[in-house]
Image: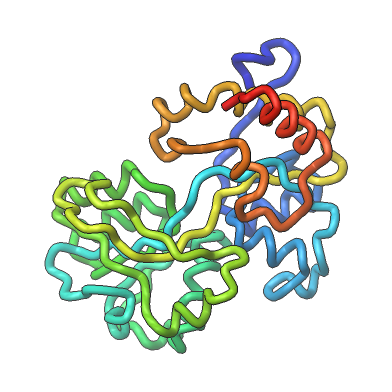
Amino acid sequence: VNRREEGELRCSPDPTPGSIYNLAGLERGDLDFALVQSDWQRLAYEGAPPFQDAGAFSEMRSVMALYPEYLSILVSAESELESSQDILGARIEIGEPGSGRRATIDRMLAGMGLGLEDFDLIEELPIGGAIEALCDGRIDATVLVIGHPNRAVDQAIRDCDARLVPARGPLLDTLFAEGLDVTRATIAARTYPDQERAIPTYAVTATLVTTTRADDGAVTALVQDTLSSLRLLAVRAPVLQGLEPEAMRSRGLTAPLHPAAEAAFEAAVSQGDG
């Protein structure tokens, strides 16, 4: 956007703690657009727990869906953990309070009937700190919600022989059975060094949202400029490979498409863009 709209529009991509923070900032008007996980988009739009006190965020509007963010359990080389069903009593890292990752992991643990007291150690760290703790042997596993390939995961696998293990089982299958915002997924084989098998898990979708207050021209520019740059973006950021306009205007989106986004997608599809 900044390259194509120079002098007319500028995006400032600011790092934040994650989806929960972003949704609150968007609703207050502190943010114009926000990246949020599809599960928290749905819960906020519907006013479901943990958003019941604030009520439904009915003014939220979807702009586009991006890449899958996989529930990813990365364990240390010394760990005997083989899947999500083995984490009881382990030393684990679960993300910073208030982040979308942490909220998703809290939901996962609750669905498995586990509380923080069921673990030998709980760490609450950003991803970089989690990888460092894993490689230093301070924790047995970190639970991530990320797109793949991911540079931090690749680093952990290369530097300290960390490995990804499946996040599946009867309790998680029941928890995520609806498939509205969390779907069955696999991390493809050979995504990382020595990863010979696909890793079964679940995934949410990284989505871009705004509100009914958004400027139509800004929404149009965001969608048009992104769709016209998909091939370049896929080269620069492999996590964005395989994006298609049809999926980008529907996958994981609970809040209605902003009218300007819908018009931009219609134009792109009719022209064969992307």
Q: Relative to residue 153, is residue 127 drawn left or right?
A: right
Q: Residue at x 79, y 74 (%)?
A: 53
Q: In the rendered picture of this protein, how many numbered marks are placed on residues?
A: 0
27 and 187: which one is in front?
187
21 and 153: which one is in front?
153
Q: Is residue 151 above or below residue 123?
A: above
Q: Residue at x 19, y 63 (%)?
A: 76
Give residue 30's quadrant in the image: top right
In the image, residue 169 lies at what x, y percent?
37, 80
Q: Residue at x 67, y 22 (%)?
A: 271
76 and 271: which one is in front?
271
- Residue ranking furthest to the top: 7
Give residue 94's quadrant in the image: bottom left
Q: Relative to residue 120, is residue 180 drawn left or right?
A: right
Q: Is residue 224 above or below residue 83?
A: above
In the image, residue 224 lies at what x, y percent?
68, 25
Q: Relative to residue 16, is residue 34 drawn left or right?
A: right
Question: What scheme was used to colour the molecule?
Answer: rainbow
Q: Residue at x 19, y 53 (%)?
A: 195
In the image, residue 270 lies at what x, y percent?
70, 27
Asked if one can make out residue 247 in the rendered structure from this viewpoint, the answer is yes
In the image, residue 119 lies at what x, y percent?
34, 83
Q: Is residue 198 above or below residue 46?
A: above
Quadrant that contains the C terminus: top right
Asked if one can make out residue 222 in the rendered structure from this viewpoint, the answer is no
Quadrant that contains the N terminus: top right
